[in-house]
Image: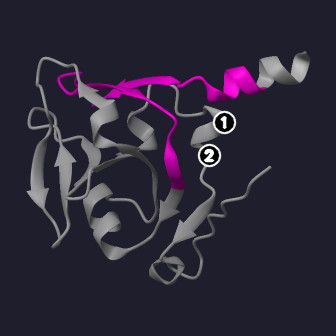
Amino acid sequence: MASAIIKARAARPRRYTGGCLCGAVRFEAIGPVEAPHTCSCRTCQRHTGALTAAWVELPSYSVTWTGTGGMPSVYRSSEFSSRAFCRACGSTIGAIDDKPVIALLLGIFDKPTARELMPAYHSYRGGRPKWWHVEATTE
């Protein structure tokens, strides 16, 4: 019986909320999240101003923009993706890919410490300085 309850809870989609610094761009997403990871590519570094970015991906149909600012502004950063930010405060939101995926930075989540958001791998390790150590581990 206990295992059935655990499976039922795991199968239930989770609701996530978050937003930018000023609150104009807010989101609600229905999970599960996909590909929780960190990245140290040069594009992520320039987009966030940090040596490493922490992301999760969601199907675009599961993300609703709920704030007064509506959808975030975007900058076309590559052949397949646009970087999203708040036009009011400049906060980095994530990336909106051409494939139906929205990648959200963990720092914009209202509860960024949720266990399922924990990065499972690191992309572009070679992009980080040798002295920068960020390890993604699964428990």
Residue 60 against residue 42 in the figure, above or below: above
- Mark 1 residue crowding within 10 angstroms, few (<14) / some (14–19) / many (20+): few
Magenta stretch in the rendered image: 7-36
| 116 displayed left or right of 31 | right
Any part of residue 21 in sight: no
The answer to whether residue 15 shows anywhere in this view is: yes
- How far apart are labels 2 and 1 at the CA level? 6 Å
Quarter the N terminus occupies: top right
Q: Nearer the viewer, residue 85 or 65?
A: 65
> What residue is disc 2 on?
118
Q: Determine whether, in the image, residue 114 is placed left or right of residue 73.
A: right
Q: Residues within 10 Å of mark 2 (few under 14, many from 20)?
A: many
Q: Residue at x 66, y 36 (%)?
A: 115
Q: Could you tell me residue 135's position as x and y percent?
A: 67, 64
Find numbered disc 2 in the image and state the secondary structure of the residue it sits on.
loop
Where does the image place residue 71, in percent across and percent down from the top left?
13, 33
**Label 2 close to label 1 by CB (< 8 Å):** yes
Is residue 35 part of the magenta span, yes or no? yes
Residue at x 63% of width, y 57% of height: 120
Q: Give residue 109's position: percent from left, percent from top.
A: 43, 31
Which residue is disc 1 drawn over?
115
Q: How many marks?
A: 2
Q: In the figure, 28 relative to 57: above or below?
A: above
Q: Amino acid at mark 2?
A: Met
